[in-house]
Each structure stands twice: as C-alpha cells, then as structure tokens.
Amino acid sequence: MVLCFKLLFGPTAAIFLSAVVILSCFTNVPRLQLGYTDGDLGRSSYLAAPAPPPKCDIFRGEWVPDPDAPHYTNETCAFIQEHQNCMFYGRPDLDFLKWRWKPHGCDLPRFDPHRFLAVVGNKTIAFVGDSLARNHMQSLLCLLSKVASPKDVSVTDKSDPNKILYYEGYNFTIYLFWSPFLVRSEEVGGDRPGVFRLYLDEPDDRWLSASSRFDYVLLSGANWFTRESYFYERGQLVGGMYVPLNFTSSLTNQYSHRMAFRTALRALTVARFRGKVILRTLSPMSHFEGGAYNAGGDCRRTRPFGANETAPMGGVELGFYTSQLEEFREAAAARGLDVALMDPTAAMLMRPDGHPSRYGHWPDEKRTLYNDCIHWCLPGPVDAWNDMLLHMLSDSN
C-alpha cells in the first residue's frame, strides 16, 4: 500500500500511470461484478433492490390473551343491539373478552379510532347483508364512540332496518342495508310466514341503486339461505329449498347462495362501481352444541378454541364458504371491479365462547327465544373484524 501511494502521489509519479495500475493497487477493495445476459447489462447483488418482506396473512393465526380488553362496554356505547348486549343481561363470565386476534408471523394492531377516521374522512362505507352485517357495524360504532358519535340522518323511521349515520366532523357516512339475500326477495306471506321467493339473477335494488355514493361496500350473507325458499331465474321458478315443487330440481341452497354473490358482484361491475368492494366470508353457524338451534342447542363455552381444537367445516357451512371464495376469485380475475376478500371465518370458528347464548334477554321474558349461537356479544370477538377492516382500508389507501 505504501508503494502505491508513492507511485500515485510521490514526486516521481508518472502522469501516464494507467487506470489499470491504480486498480491493481487496491486489490483488497471489492469490485462490482457486472455480467451480461442476452446483451443487457446484468444487475449485481450490490445494486439489486432488497426483496420485499412476505405479506402477512392477517386471517390465519390464533387468539392470544389481552389483559387490556375490552375497549368499550355496554355503559360507554349506546349502539349495542339488545340481543347482543350480553353484559347487560348478566353474562357471568367475562374472561371471553380478554383475547385478541394475533396472525401468524406478524401483528394486527388493535383498532385505533383516530387512525380509522383519518382513513375514511370524506368517504362513505356501506354494510350490505343480514343481522351479522349489523353486528359488525355496531361493533364499529362502539369502537369509534371513544372519539366521536354519528348523527342518524336516515330518511325513514326508526323501525326501518336501513340506516344512514353521519360523522359530521369527519364528513364520514355509514350506510346499513338490510339485504339478507343480496338479491331481490319477497316473503310469500299468507299462511306461510318465513318462506321466501329469491330472484337469483336480480340484485336487490335497495342497495345497488345507492352504490354510486359509496367508496367502500361490504357484502356478506349466509344464514338466511338456510330458510325455506323458492328460486327464480329470468322470472321462472327453477327450484327451491325445503319447499314443495311440482317438478324435479337438483338445486340447493348452496346454489342460491353462490348465485346471489355472483349476481351482486356482477351488478356492481355493470354499474361501473369505482369504489372498493369487500366480500366478507361467513360467520360460523356450527357452534350449537347438544342439539340444533330449535332443539335446545346452546353455546356455553368460556374460552376460545386453539387451532388444533377446531373441527373442520363441513356440510352447508363449507359449501357456503367455498362459493364465497370462488365467486371472489372470479370477480377479481374478471377485472373491472376493485374487490378484496375479508376472511374472518377461521378466526371465528375458534370462538364458540363469544355468542350471547341465553344472555340476550331476561330468562323470565314470556316469549320464545332460542339460544343465540350465531350473533356475537358486544363487546366481543366480532371487534376483531374491525381490526381487520382498518388494516385493509389502510393498505388500500
């Protein structure tokens, strides 16, 4: 090295010293290894951009203890539906509240109301579905209640299940549309209450006609497809489930469920919807133990299942879930629609402890009420859906 400096900077240095000599003096310095491929300059390991970290799947994980939960109560939130108000109706065990969802290999931050309102400011979100869509929305209202409360600006009376709620300081609007089948439906009525006609190729115009106002729309639905129903396509009766038909049909409620999601997604594409569609997969229907919902079945567990304790889905539940995944993939592949999948199903399969059971009413009420193993206590595991929702909306923005 001394010799090199003398050659380069000493009084006897020759001005014609070549670059080759200079480089040969610094043989201890690593050189960029540049190669050529098909005539193009290759990239060295020094110049290559770092590989992006693997994306976290927030829908696969486990429930871990959370001593700081819950983040609201029935006393701090006025938006809890009566039948999900488990604390009010005296549920004795509250340990089911002390858990949070933890994805494998990464963390899902708890819902931050300030951050959420910053993301959705000047925007509109619509929840379209059945009472579980309402359950989800009311969880969101409760989580936001620490920061702000909305005004009810609905254009109908209070008995109407469709709602419009407005957060004035943030110019943020929430729509709730009661549309348990997503497509046009009508109750047969008369001496057959609870029996429906489903027009599987006609979207429910109550929510679709308002879609131009939405920045985000969450589509969900499953439970109501297990009801007695007639199936119509192109105005013609093509089949049914649990109803008498004067012709043979192989169509089941798995078909009606699939077609409803297909019709809803295609209708948004045809309408040139420019917002983001979020398809939420089903919430479990299989947490009844000791009998069916109308035969004494109940859900009295007090802690979550571990991943190795959860029975795999089967039957109608698996069929509904599969059709949602497949219709999502078809809509995403078809392009023209910005669609994302919100898949809390695996997480909620682990939470048989999170339902109201008998704690959605007083035990001496003189009316027939089944144990509720479908909806979720508020506060409760359903709050994790909004942890997921905030993550998805932040990611998309």
Image (cartoon, grey):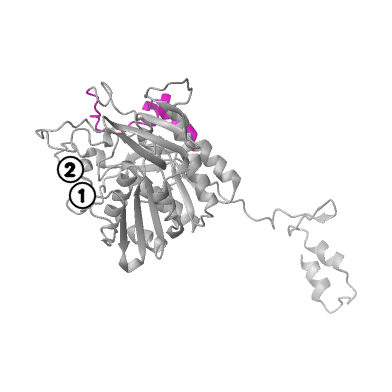
Amino acid type, label 1: Thr
Amino acid type, label 2: Met
Span highlighted in magenta in the image: 296-324
Label 2 with label 1: CB-CB less than 8 Å: yes
Give the image location of residue 383, x and y in percent. 32, 46
Horizontal side of residue 86 vs 388, given as left or right: left
The residue positioned 55% from the left and 49% from the top of the image is: 53
Please tell me which residue lies in front, 67 or 277.
277
Give residue 129's mark: none
| Magenta residue check for 208 | no
The residue positioned 89% from the left and 76% from the top of the image is: 14
Give the image location of residue 58, x and y in percent. 45, 44
**SS at badge 2:** loop
Q: Is residue 229 above or below residue 216?
A: above
**Mark 1 = which residue?**
73
Give the image location of residue 150, x and y in percent. 28, 61
**Mark 2 = which residue?**
87
**SS at badge 1:** loop
Q: Earlier in the sequence, mark 2 or mark 1?
A: 1
Horizontal side of residue 328 vs 253, given as left or right: right
Q: CA distance from mark 2 to mark 1?
A: 8 Å
Q: Is residue 266 visible?
A: yes
Please tell me which residue lies in front, 267 or 72.
267
